[in-house]
Image (cartoon, rainbow, N blue to C red):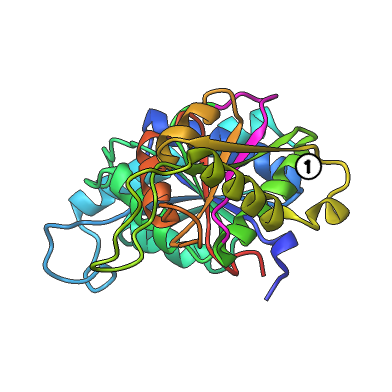
Amino acid sequence: MNSIASRPVVVGVDGSDASVAALDWALTEARVLRVPLRIVHAVQWPLLPLPPRSYPLGTGDDTARTAGERVLAEAACRCVTAAPDVTVEIELVIADPTGALLQQSASASLVVVGATGAGELTGVVLGSVADVVATKARCPAVVVRRPSAADGPVVVGIDGSPGADTAFDFALQHADRRRVPLIAMYAWHGVASYGPGVMLPLVVDWELVAEEARRGLAEAIAGWSEKYPDVTVEQRVVRAHPVQALADAGRFAQLLVVGSRGHGGYVGLLLGSVAQGLVHHGPCPVAVVHQGALR
């Protein structure tokens, strides 16, 4: 198998505005990474009882295939015009969009989808595709809702889990390639319960909790500066719901990065739910990085 450094960036398109935004973002990333861009469109016929490929294409099927080929051709033309130095591949797949992109993720460096595609050609709301791809992709997944601030920082959520370490590495790589600062953020909004029947103190020293959070964040990112000496990292601890805190920081960011299914030792942060919240409400592209996704 090719190393991750040479694998293509894969983007799913369906002709919607959201998928065009995803296409543009994926093209820029493929150009920066110096890897091919693979544009995928999935055609399915959900009303037919037989599995795809088990029946001859009829008139309706030919129409769907022709429409899909047109979407791919328009996407490829847009990319070749904007970045003629990027190798562009197109692939029409007879499958459901989610399954097609998950299969592609096994051999991709990155898979990119739009956040709220209308799914005119497939009958599938691309928002639901984004949810599943972000959760189950075998490589980092980026969900694009709208164009990002090209010169903005990268923001990454940290919670002290192994998954967050992988997300932090991904965020550092992106910031290093784009020559922008990185904001490492830990957000907390409550005190954890230690189990049934365990009484929490009525009076909480919030400054002490914040100091512990700052110490935990510093420990979580210690040592990474040696690997990425050119990246300026700002440590930011915020008392707020993680989704809200990261979304607020992302208003001026070019990318938000979170781990998936991480559960750290700090207070009240489950990155699985944070990732899902940001996929739906993130103000800029959101990268969801699974533990081990960069191997």
Task: Report helix, strand or loop for mark 1.
Answer: helix
Q: Amino acid at mark 1?
A: Arg
**Residue 72, how many percent across, how many down?**
47, 42
Count of all numbered marks drawn on residues in the image: 1
In the picture provided, is 184 more to the left or to the right than 283? right
Relative side of 183 to 118, left or right = right
Q: Is 84 in front, or is 37?
A: 37
User: Does 108 sit above or below residue 268?
Assistant: below
- Identify the image quadrant of residue 149: top right
Q: Nearer the viewer, residue 161 or 203?
A: 203
Residue range highlighted in magenta: 148-160
Residue 209 is situated, as x and y percent measured from the top left of the image, at: 52, 46
Write the residue at 65% across / 28% down: 81
Above-or-below relation of 42 to 153: below
| Residue 2 appears in view | yes
In reply to whether residue 156 is colored magenta, the answer given is: yes
In the figure, is residue 7 to the left or right of 98?
right
What quarter of the picture does the C terminus occupy?
bottom right
Q: Main secondary structure of the magenta part?
A: loop
Task: Give the residue drawn at x 34%, y 59%.
Answer: 193
Q: Position of residue 208 (x, y in %)?
A: 55, 44
Q: Is residue 109 visible?
A: no
Where residue 192 sits in the image (x, y, percent)? 38, 56
Give the quarter of the figure containing the N terminus: bottom right
Name the residue: 21% across, 46% down. Answer: 123
Which residue occupies 27% across, 47% down? 122
Residue designated by label 1: 177
